[in-house]
Amino acid sequence: MSQPLAGRNVAVAVGGGIAAYKACDFVRELRRQGAEVRVAMTRGACEFVTPLTMQNLSGHPVFTDTFEASQDHAYGHLQLARWADLFVVAPATADLLARIRAGLGNDAVTTTLLAFRGQVLLAPAMNTAMWDHPETQATVQALAAQPKYRFVGPVAGPLADGDVGMGRLAELPALVEATVSLAVQGPLAGKSVLVTAGPTREFLDPVRFLSNPSTGKMGLAMGEVARALGARVTVVLGPTEASVSKGLEVVRVTSADDMLAAVMPRVEAADVFVAAAAVSDWKAQTVSALKTKKGDGPESLVLVRTPDVLATASAKVHENPRRPLLVGFAAETNDVEAYARGKLERKRLDLVVANDVSAPGSGFGVDTNRVVVFSRDGEAGRAEGPKREVARAIWDVVLGRLK
Ligand code: CTP
């Protein structure tokens, strides 16, 4: 089954109307389409559907109260706003629409929406008289004039109160279709992104290898964000236990040579190549087919260089009239800027993302990172925080260059 929302984080905000019960099926359907779903509910919504129902359907705790310390810790409005790629308000009541229009932040839903930078799909549902009211119509028109907001529905038909008229929540297939079409319209729609991520292993014999502590999380975050922005993403991934989100095509590799073999046939078709892998720089000159037995004396190992995947790919695409944007990473412990800019020149890159792996909260194995992005013209951006947010900031720089 194709899952058009695979790899997308969709936040559903539920307003307090009778159509709130339909949000249950909607959440379930979004998950069937591959989305990760988290739910925020107004106080009114909780009168119609319990947060526990939504928690079970979405698989995550539900955000209902901005001021409850435990909720703020687990899913505060800022966390939920940062997490989401896309917001759907279903049902959007007259009151909720008016509060969004006024820029209020007076409950869990509106504070989160205020903190959210992406696009919002509004699915109104209310009684016909309320829909027709000049204030509601003025609200809808004002919101519809902003590119940030899209509407789906309402539709005409029998209403819960016995009336027949305009005001029914859009039907489930229409809600899902509108969500999907918004999700695939990101700034990287139609673009193809190739990422290397994770460490490599250079085996000495069948039971021993050279490697490094990379987990691949930064590269995977780069892939996930690109996917969320609409790209087709392939990640060439070294050995790692890190979980891989569903929307990514993954090619598993072990050694630097494998990584090179996976990258070279794919790089020319890419629009952006992001080399985030921590490739081992050396391998054993000879690899023993049998386990090497230990002796008593000192041992020596002859090492030779592995191929530089990024530099080799860069040299190849520079021969072409059209080439991908090339983004390298530089993990350094000292003289970060000078070394990073050296790599930019030597490997003929467009951008290099430098991180000081010796700084706390940055580098291998942790969930946060602190980076500075350099182009040939100097510093092009910096970011600090969870790896996914850092990835988003790096993509903002890349998007600026793609234009
Ligand atoms: N890289 C690569 N293949 C290698 C080594 C590095 O593709 N064999 C890529 C990395 O994915 C990263 C960039 O090159 O994007 C910088 O990697 P790094 O190992 O820091 O650079 P080196 O050129 O090896 O420099 P040094 O060892 O002097 O730090």
Image (tube, grey):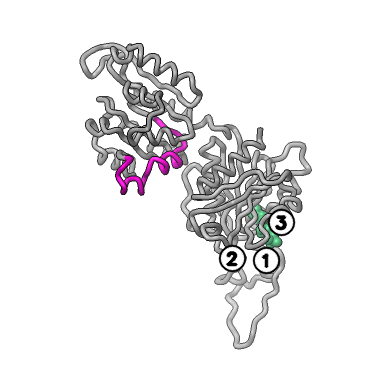
The answer to whether the residue bearing label 1 lies less than 8 angstroms from the nearest atom of ligand 1 is no
Residue 393 position by quadrant:
top right
Q: Residue at 54%, 57% (x, y): give it.
A: 362
Give the structural element (helix, strand or loop) at label 3.
helix
| Residue situated in front as seen by the camera: 75 or 309 | 75
Indicate the position of residue 228 as horizontal and vertical percent values. Answer: 51, 38
Q: Nearer the viewer's eye, disc 3 or disc 1?
A: 3
Q: Nearer the viewer's eye, disc 2 or disc 3?
A: 3
* Badge 3 amino acid: Ala
| Crowd band around label 2 with a 10 angstrom C-alpha radius: few (<14), some (14–19), many (20+) | some
Tag 1 near tag 2, CB within 8 Å: no
Q: Magenta stretch: residue 125 in it?
A: no
* Badge 2 amino acid: Ser
Q: Magenta stretch: residue 71 in it?
A: yes
The quadrant of the rendered image in which ligand 1 is seen is bottom right
Mark 1 → mark 2, Cα distance in angstroms: 9 Å
**In the rendered view, would you say 59 is above or below 310?**
above
Give the structural element (helix, strand or loop) at label 2.
loop
State the count of labels. 3
Magenta-highlighted residues? 66-88
Mark 2 → mark 3, Cα distance in angstroms: 25 Å
Tag 2 near tag 3, CB within 8 Å: no
Say which label, 3 or 1, has the lower sequence index: 1
Identify the residue position indicated by label 2 in the image: 211
Identify the residue position indicated by label 3 in the image: 338
Disc ID at residue 282: 1
Indicate the position of residue 300 as horizontal and vertical percent values. Answer: 67, 79
Indicate the position of residue 369 as horizontal and vertical percent values. Answer: 54, 53
Residue 292 position by quadrant:
bottom right
